[in-house]
Image: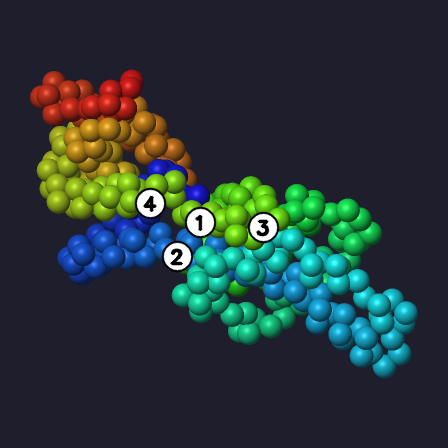
Amino acid sequence: MLNRRHLRVKVLQSLYAYHQSNSGDIKQHEKNLLQSIDKVYEMYIWMLSLISEVAGYASTDAEERANKHLPTADDLHADVKILSNRFIISLQQNKEFLAAIKKYKVAWDFEPELAKSLFIILKNAEEYKEYLQKTGDTIQTDKDIIKFIFKKVILKSSLAEQVFEDKFIYWPVDKDVLQALIAKTFKNFAYDDPEQNKLAEVTGNWEEDRQFIVDLFEQTIRHNDGYQEMIGQKTQNWEPERIAMMDTLLMKMAIAEFINFASVPVKVTINEYLEISKEFSTPKSNSFINGILDKILYELKAQNKINKIGRGLIE
C-alpha cells in the first residue's frame, strides 16, 4: 500500500506539475493529486484482472487443443485445474473487485494476445506442471501458483511491462506499491469463504492520509515565497539556476512539515526527503538538502516556530 513516503512523492509530482504549468488553479492540481492516488488503485485492479485472465485462458487453450486437426490424447483431456483455483474463484466473486472492474471499465480486448502469451509461458513452466499434479490443495497452496503467475510470469514479461507503462504514466514509480498491494491481497485472501476475503486498501488510513497530502500540497504552495526566501538566505553563494528544481521543492515541502505538521517529527521529515532526493534528484542533492535544512531548522527553532506535539516530539 501507499506509505507516507509514497504519498510525499505524489505531492512532489503534483507540485512539479503545478510549477511547470501555466495554470495557477490550485484546486485543479489538487484534484489531479487525488486522481494520481486513485490511479494506483486502478492499476492494482487491472493487475488483479490480468492475473484472472491468465488463469482463465486455460479454458480457451483447452478448447483450441481439443479442436486441433489431429488432437492427441493430452489435447483432448487438457488439465484445467487452475479454473477451480480458490484464489481466482474468490477474486471473481469479490464484490469490491467486481465494482472496481465496472468503475474502471477494465477489459483486455485491446490487447488480446497478452493473456495468451502469458499463459503459454505459464503452461511451459515446471512450477505449473507440478501444480497440476498436486492433490489436496487448499486456499494457501492455491495462492502459491497465483504468486508464481504474478511474480515470475507477468512481472517478467516485457509485453506486460509495456502495456502497463503505456496505460499508467507513473508505472516505473508505482510498480513497487503495486507489488505491495498484491502481496497484501495474498495475505488477506486466507479464507475458503469468499465473503471473508478483502482487497488491499490503497493506504493504511485514507481519511487521515488524504488530509495529509492535501494539506502538504496547499501549505507548500501557499507559503512558497516565504519558503523560497528561507532557502535563498542559506544558498547565497549558489546561483539559483544551479539549484535543481526538485531540490527546491523537496526543501519547501520539508519546511512546510517543520512548521505546519505538529505530529510529524523533524527527524522523520528530514530522513524522508533525503531518501526521496536519492531517487528523484541529482547525486549530490542528498548532502546539499541535508545541509540547508539543518541550517533552516536551527533558525526556525531559535524563532520558536517549531511546535511539535504527541508523536511529533520524538527525536
* Disc 1 versus disc 3: nearer the observer: 3
> What amino acid type should be assigned to the residue bearing mark 1?
Asp
Q: Are marks 1 and 4 in contact (CB under 8 Å)?
A: no
Q: Secondary structure at mark 3?
A: loop
- Quadrant of the rendering where the N terminus is positioned: top left
- Compared with 70, 54 (above or below) is above
**Along the polypeptide, which appears first: circle 1 or circle 3?**
1
Image point (72%, 63%), residue name: 120
Name the residue that disc number 2 marks. Answer: 39
Q: Are marks 3 and 4 in contact (CB under 8 Å)?
A: no
How would you rate the neighbour count of disc 1 (Cα within 10 Å): few for under 14, some for 14-19, many for 20 or more? many
> What amino acid type should be assigned to the residue bearing mark 2?
Lys
Image-quadrant location for residue 159: bottom right
Q: Secondary structure at mark 4?
A: helix
Left or right position of 213 against 220? right
> What amino acid type should be assigned to the residue bearing mark 3?
Asp
C-alpha distance separating marks 2 and 4: 14 Å
How would you rate the neighbour count of disc 3 (Cα within 10 Å): few for under 14, some for 14-19, many for 20 or more? few
C-alpha distance separating marks 2 and 3: 29 Å
How would you rate the neighbour count of disc 4 (Cα within 10 Å): few for under 14, some for 14-19, many for 20 or more? few
Please state which of residues 247 and 182 is positioned toward the viewer in this rendering. Answer: 182
Q: Residue furthest bottom?
A: 69
Name the residue that disc number 3 marks. Answer: 193
Name the residue that disc number 1 marks. Answer: 174
**Along the polypeptide, which appears first: circle 2 or circle 1?**
2
User: Which label was assigned to residue 24?
Assistant: none
User: Which label was assigned to residue 206?
Assistant: 4
Q: Secondary structure at mark 2?
A: helix
C-alpha distance separating marks 2 and 1: 10 Å
- Compared with 83, 156 (above or below) is above
> What amino acid type should be assigned to the residue bearing mark 4?
Trp
**Along the polypeptide, which appears first: circle 1 or circle 4?**
1
